[in-house]
Amino acid sequence: MRATALALLLVVSASGVARAEGVPPPPVPQLPDEPLPEWHPPPPTNRHAMFLQMSPQMQDAQKIRQAGLWISSFGWAQLLLGGVLYAWAADLNQDEGSPPPPNVPGLFNPQLEDERNRVLGATRAFLTIGGIMAAGGFVLYTMGQWKITSHHKSHPSEPLPPLSGF
Amino acid sequence: MSESMRRLLLPLLLLCGCAPTSAVVDGKTVPRLDMDFVGQPFVVRVSAAHPKPGSPSGGLRDFGGRISGNICGLDVTYDVQHEGTRTRLTGFVDEKQTDSRLEVRDVDGVSRQITGSLDSESGTAVNLDVRKNAIRGNIGLRTFDLGRDGDRYIGSVKVVGITTSATINGADDLWTLPPAAQAVVLPALLTCYGDELEQNKRGAFIVGFGGRQTWEGKHVSAIYHAQTGDVQRAMMQGNQSSTVGH
């Protein structure tokens, strides 16, 4: 029993020693005293001091997240516009196949077809660009959020941006 | 609030809100100075500073401006008052309820002594002897012994349960700070890395003046790590030194 207790004590004390991992200090230079320097205002510099509420890493991550939100928002707006244009193109297509009453039924109208093609082209462009922007923005947002999450895990006491998810 | 209280408080508030924008130096009215200083990891702004404060014990009696900023994750704000034989700083550190009081004075023209309390709530007393070629003294339960080696101070910091290497880079830049700013920045900076030293008992202490500004998160300072078992035991034993320097 005593041997077990002694072994436990040794293990605990050994872990205690291993826990302290300071860097051996260098010898302290011993120089004679000198008069304190007189203070003069430093010359103005172009250096910018940053007074931050959040760490630069968190600010960068928040900027990425915000950029993602904006880009994705524009993307979704373009997708909506593309949807509206598609409905317009479908309507023009319908008119082309069976024109409304004042027109002669079955008469091909090339102007109507050109208009439909223009609207359809714009629809394709809006849907493609909007899709890319919506997806790209989402990826950027996720990347920013991932950076915030990983930084928060390593620095849990640091201030977080609004709507950080924590 | 009674009418008499309101009458008293209004002029007081107006008085506090209007810091002087100029000072008299050698009989001439000179505009006060606004300066920014950065380091690793700190940034402070000295506003409405006296343009020629001289030595903190040089006899000047005047308002010395305000110092605010972030030092190793600590938000600090101090009012500076030159009081002839000393310069007194009163302010707040982070959201602490108790105020912080520091004093700086020069002794024999070779020693700048910074004393007071960084944060009375955690019992972080300041007792520093800053010389051109050495920095010695205590911040809370930390004891520093540093000597000048070129543009840096090197030596040791003794924390409860660990003695490790300590380096302050930018020794020349330290002396570009006015004495009052030194008294604000240096003690707070020397509490840095409490999460490593006090909490985990590992690592080295490296900070700096000038150069590229760096940033440290909240609650890294040793004033937030005074509750560890070793620190509490040391405080109970009362082994905190009360002497400055040698």
Image (tube, coloured by chain):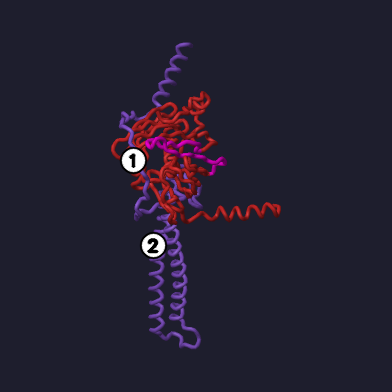
The chain displayed purple equals A
The mark lying in front, picked from 1 and 2, is 1
Determine the main secondary structure of the stretch shown in magenta. Answer: strand
Label 2 SS: helix
Q: Position of residue B92 (x, y in %)?
A: 52, 44
Q: Residue furthest right?
A: B2
Q: Position of residue B61 (x, y in %)?
A: 49, 46
Q: Position of residue B154 (x, y in %)?
A: 33, 34
Name the residue tied to disc 1: B171
Label 1 SS: helix
Q: Position of residue A104 (x, y in %)?
A: 46, 88
> Callout 1: residue from which chain?
B
* Residue B71 appears in view: no
Q: Which residues are magenta?
A: B95-118
**Amino acid type, label 1:** Ala
Judged left or right of residue B3, residue B37 is: left
Name the residue tied to disc 2: A132
- Would you call the spot at circle 1 few (<14 residues within 10 Å), some (14-19), or many (20 or more)? many
